Amino acid sequence: MKSLILTLGAVAVAASTSVAGDVTGKITLKGTPAPEKEIPMDPACGALHPGKKPTTRFYVVDAGGGLADCVVYLEGAKGGAGDKPVVIDQKGCEYLPYINSAQVKQTIRVLNSDPAMHNVHPTPTVDGNKEQNKAMLPKGAPLEFTFEKPEKFLRFKCDVHPWMFSYVSIFDHGFHAVSGKDGSFTIAGVPDGKYKLVVEHRKGGKAEKDIEVKGGAKADFTLEAK
């Protein structure tokens, strides 16, 4: 009986220690995208960028070809928790970050670090996600938004400064990420199993791979400039 109890205990420990891992990888851009365009800021906003001319951010690529701002997710995954607010700042009359991801009903908190008035105007296209338009005073109190339905690249814009955009992809699970400046990504705490891993970029399109997570997994992608 004692040996049976020890054996069952060992099985329980094994089951509890091999249930999840991180899915990691890197996204590389193939080809040369068109040059980014200078943003025609008004003088007040332009003064917030001394010695620098801000440009569009259609393709953000590092010296090694790593592609930032790709939304990476496990298609059809269940569970996961987006318990911390997703933060977007308005700084230098730009939305930072340009691309983000969140879970349905997760708080999206918008800040205004500028000495300028903005208005925060999310423009969802999926029924059940509410369009709103809220003014925000210079360095004003944060605004908070939530969305009820999944939606890819839900647009936030500022009508006061028409070049200001940010995009948030909303998922009904917590297994998603956005690639960093070097193109790398991490989706943390993925339960062991078989999944379809998908990468989407606003300009570079979409790619996917079937993966199996066994205490973690690694998958790299290449997208082509269009």
Image (cartoon, rainbow, N blue to C red):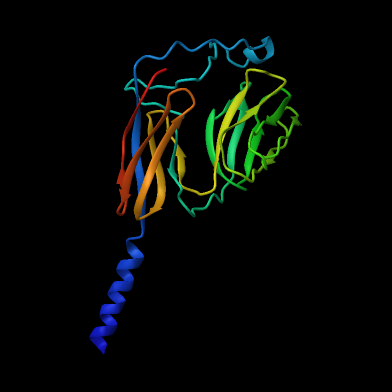
What's the residue at 33%, 32% (across, down)? Answer: 221
**Which image quarter holds the C terminus?**
top left
Give above or below for 174 relative to 130: below
Closest to the observer, 76 or 57: 76
Closest to the observer, 15 or 92: 15
Q: Is residue 60 left or right of residue 19?
A: right
What's the residue at 67%, 9% (across, down)? Answer: 43
Q: How many marks?
A: 0
Q: Position of residue 154 (x, y in %)?
A: 59, 33
What's the residue at 75%, 29% (across, down)? Answer: 137
Identity of the residue furthest to the bottom in this view: 1
Closest to the observer, 31 or 83: 31
**Which image quarter holds the N terminus?**
bottom left
Q: Position of residue 160 (x, y in %)?
A: 72, 20
What's the residue at 52%, 31% (across, down)? Answer: 99
Q: Position of residue 225 (x, y in %)?
A: 39, 19
Give above or below for 20 relative to 219: below
The part of the image, by quadrant, that contains residue 95 is top right
The part of the image, by quadrant, that contains residue 96 is top right
Q: Position of residue 214 (x, y in %)?
A: 30, 54
The part of the image, by quadrant, that contains residue 181 is top left
Identity of the residue furthest to the left in this view: 3
